[in-house]
Structures are given as C-alpha cells and as structure tokens.
Image: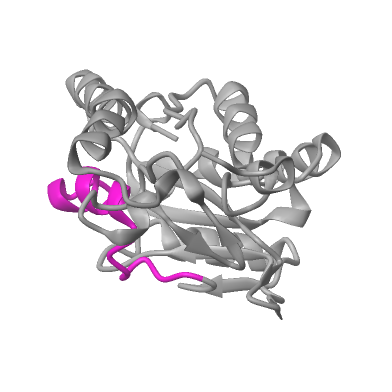
Amino acid sequence: MGLDPFARRCHLAIDIGAGKLTETIAKSLGVTAVIAQYSRLVVDCNRQLMDPGAFLEYGDGILVPGNRNLTQAEKDARANAIYWPYHNAIDEQIKRLEALGPAPAFISVHSFTPVLNGIARDVQMGVLWDKDDRLSDIFIEEFRNAGFLTGDNEPYSGRAPQDFTIDHHAEEIGLPHVGIEVRQDLIDDIAGVDEIAPIMHDIVASIPERIGLTREKISA
C-alpha cells in the first residue's frame, strides 16, 4: 500500500482494539463473531463499494499511495477477495441462527480515534442507530450507568450511509441491531480490553430477556 509502519498501525488503517474486544466478548458469551481481517485501506468492508472511502486515497493527513488511480479491475479483485467473503460470512451466520429459532440480534463493534483532524473527542462510547432503538436504548443507558461519557449517534451517526454492514445485513430484514464505537485509548492494550469486555458482556447478556430473545440466538 506504500505506507510507512506508523501509518499501517494508525486508526486510519485499523479499528484499534476492536478486534480483540469483539473476540473477548464473543468467547465469554459463546456467541458468533465475524471479524474483518484486512485493513480497511485495502477495502473498507463497512462502506458501499461505490463510496469513495471504500478505497481511501487520503485521510487525516495520511496519503495512501496504493489506492491512487486504482482501475475498476483492481477494485473488483479486492472486493472479490476480501469484501464479499466477509459479507457472505455474515449472511451465512444470520441464516444459521435464524434457522435455530428467533431472529438474532446484530451488534457491530468498532473503535474511533480520540483525536481527528486535530480535534479532541470527549465521548468515550458511541452508540449508533437509525430507525430501530431496541438495542441502542439499552447500550446508552448501561454505558452511562457504568460512568462512560456516551454519545447518542456520536461521534458517528447510524443514519450515515457509511454504516453499510448494519444497513445491508440487519436493517433491511428487521433484525434488532446497533453499532458500538469505543474510543481507542480505552482498548488499545490488553488491560483496557479486559476492563471494557466484562461491561459489554453484561450488557449483551441482558439483551435476550430485555427484547424477548434467548441467549443462544444472539450474534455479536
């Protein structure tokens, strides 16, 4: 991609801590996690392929040489190798869980940088939603009860078109869903993940009773 080591590890390349946090919660709950294993700078799996940000050329002061002047064939190759296998895996898990009983809950986990374009962000937890507030209300309430400064559709909005994964897999078929954004400095090491994971575990574990599912049908 033509990036130096710092750029390959920064927030523009990956959702720092989100993968480990998701794995930890999924393991403790015994639920299914589908995790993107490639940098979003190769292809952003949470955006529509027609979105310019799906193959980002520049952001937050960083130039991405490997995405300059990509041909459609090159974009298609990345999508076929990474983007569609990821989304197909999500579809397969939803179908598997639906076959077992009640529709699953869909929780999308991301992280966000504490500083973007030189502006500090005070929010610690972001809860993203659009038309369905069944899960968002739960997370906002419980995060705030736990003492976190929690944003309701902040620092990003679930109503934005960049939230493709939830829109495509959950909203279109009426699954209860929510997007969770955790500030990266809270989960950028194992100690942070070990602190946040039990809190999210308890929130997710409470969902079946609160919205009428059984625990086995949750997909994280």
Q: Residue at x 24, y 46 (%)?
A: 170
Residue 184 in the figure: left or right of residue 57: right
Residue 175 among magenta residues: yes
Residue 184 in the figure: left or right of residue 157: right
Q: Nearer the viewer, residue 5 or 110?
A: 5
Q: Which residues are magenta?
A: 156-176
Q: Is residue 2 visible?
A: yes
From this view, report whether residue 32 is shown above or below residue 111.
above
Residue 139 in the figure: left or right of residue 67: right
Q: Nearer the viewer, residue 42 or 110?
A: 42
Q: Nearer the viewer, residue 205 or 90?
A: 90
Residue 134 among magenta residues: no
Q: Residue at x 56, y 41 (%)?
A: 2
The spot of residue 46 in percent (x, y) is: 36, 48
Q: Nearer the viewer, residue 213 or 218?
A: 218
The spot of residue 205 in percent (x, y) is: 53, 38
User: For residue 3, what is the image quadrant?
Assistant: top right
Q: Quadrant of the C terminus?
A: top left
Q: Is residue 209 visible?
A: no
Question: Hey, which residue is sitting farthest right in the picture?
Answer: 191
The spot of residue 183 in percent (x, y) is: 67, 59
Q: Residue at x 34, y 41 (%)?
A: 105
Q: Residue at x 47, y 24 (%)?
A: 31
The spot of residue 101 in percent (x, y) is: 22, 25
